[in-house]
Amino acid sequence: MAVARDLGGRKNRIVTVMNNWTTMAGQVYEAMGHAGFLDSNMVVILNDSRHTLLPKADGQQKMSVNALSSALSKVQSSKGFRKFREAAKGLSKWFGKGMHEFAAKVDEYARGMIGPHGATLFEELGLYYIGPIDGNNIDDLICVLKEVATLDSTGPVLVHVITENEKDSGGDFDTEIAPNDEGTPESSQDIQIFLENGLSRTYNDCFVEAIIAEAENDKRIVVVHGGMGIHRSLRLFQSRFPDRFFDLGIAEQHAVTFSAGLACGGLKPFCIIPSTFLQRAYDQIVEDVDMQKIPVRFAITNAGLVGSEGPINSGPFDITFMSCLPNMIVMSPSDEDELIDMVATAAMVEDRPICFRYPRGDIVGTGGTSAYGNPLEIGKGEILAEGKEIAFLGYGEVVQRCLIARSLLSNFGIQATVANARFCKPLDIDLIRMLCQQHDFLITVEEGTVGGFGSHVSQFISLDGLLDGRVKWRPIVLPDRYIEHASLTEQLDMAGLTAHHIAATALTLLGRHRDALLLMK
């Protein structure tokens, strides 16, 4: 934006605000280095809430923002100081290389005296550092920002603002748990009680119980977590196996390559990353894992729609971008029991990478007590209910909505077949052939975008000549747009993925348009 302004001959201010979470990824340093190189006039405000999203060590020190540092920040931001500094740097160039280097060293040591250790890093990247500033002291903050706004010299400026959450909440804020996590227990004992009481049992809870069961029998199993915060139940694994749990915070690229290294060393890494954050590590997934057939096991959480967290935290794309990889096994459970089986399946696979996705929220399943799963046959689905004329082939938890849709259709005298694909890659081609040969219509259903499971099915049935016969195929996928904030029920309705939408699609294909409209009412 600053470059566009300069090329357009405009004089407006460009102000960028970033939080300290972004400083854990490489792009922010690439951008700051580029800004320093261009020397374009802009202001970067680092809103430092002291949330590291990494495990906290005992005795962690915090940067103090006292009266002295506040006063020095005002000096740093003053027009006179900035002009003096720029003039001194320019003047030193007239006295040769030695004097210039001497002046630069004096400037560096002076900056080190009045700023934190991180100031040197920002200065080396080419940004003029001001701070730290107490963001909870509004008067000081306004004073500094006003001074920065009046600077007329060119070059990027970074304003480091400390905003302590403790002052707002009156107590410690757990930086290891993101605000969207379901609960904040204090210890592993609290977690166990939480789960035993059956309160809000989620797919994450089910996964962790299953991975703990596998880890107890296989010392090679380790867990690598990337992304914002740690789900409450993951702490149970961490407390049980502290040396086999690695929380890397918002460092998804490193999490993937780190997992690949663990696998190369003979371990069995389960890399747990929410779908939306996994996108950030796609290059590493392709080149460091899939291309080399390294057996990293990806547990993709928060897959599909996530309700009130909106499009930023939703995970609609992972089926598409994982299933196009040549060596990747891609699967998704329809319920709790199948998730447990898929954990066991992933632990068994040692010759290639494998991934499974599961949604955020409460589980669907039989509520069995065993956390030990039975490995599934790779690339094999199952028939859940037999019918005629029309067949639903679901992938993931949406299978449950297909079963409800079948029940709705029975009220109109229609008996539909419902099949659970389990695998997107490799596909169960025998199951798909049977569904195509025995039905007039095949509807694939998934909580993902175009290019995912349905696209793989259409590719197969097209090349296999099945579309040349009696069957007609229709996909039900997420619409080609971002679904805005709403409850999960409302989002599914907006996306056309409720059981009523699925049943209405079947009625429409059968030519019963009036019944379809009646059902949707």
Image: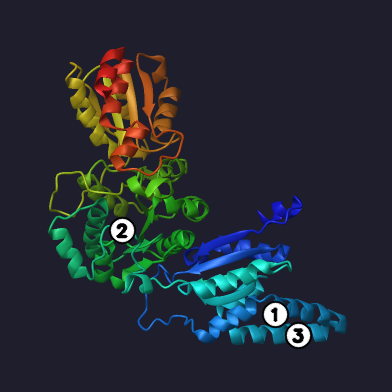
**Which image quarter: residue 150?**
bottom right
User: Which of labels 1 and 3 is toward the front?
Assistant: 1
Secondary structure under badge 1?
helix
Q: Mark 2 points at which residue?
A: 181
Distance (Cα) linking label 3 and label 2: 51 Å
Badge count: 3
Whole-percent x and y of residue 159? 58, 71
Three-letter residue code for mark 3: Ala
Whether the residues at callouts 1 and 3 have beta carbons within 8 Å, the answer is no
Q: Mark 1 points at which residue?
A: 81
In this rendering, is residue 200 above or below 150? Answer: above
Q: Residue at x 76, y 52 (%)?
A: 9
Q: Nearer the viewer, residue 515 or 253?
A: 515
Q: Which of 48 and 141 is in front in this view?
A: 141
Whole-percent x and y of residue 224? 37, 63
| Mark 2: few/some/many CA within 10 Å (<14, 14-19, 20+) | few
Q: Which of marks 3 and 2 is nearer the N terminus?
A: 3
Q: Which residue is drawn at 60% across and 79% down?
A: 74
Image quarter where the C terminus lies is top left
Q: Earlier in the sequence, mark 1 or mark 2?
A: 1
Q: Mark 3 points at which residue?
A: 103
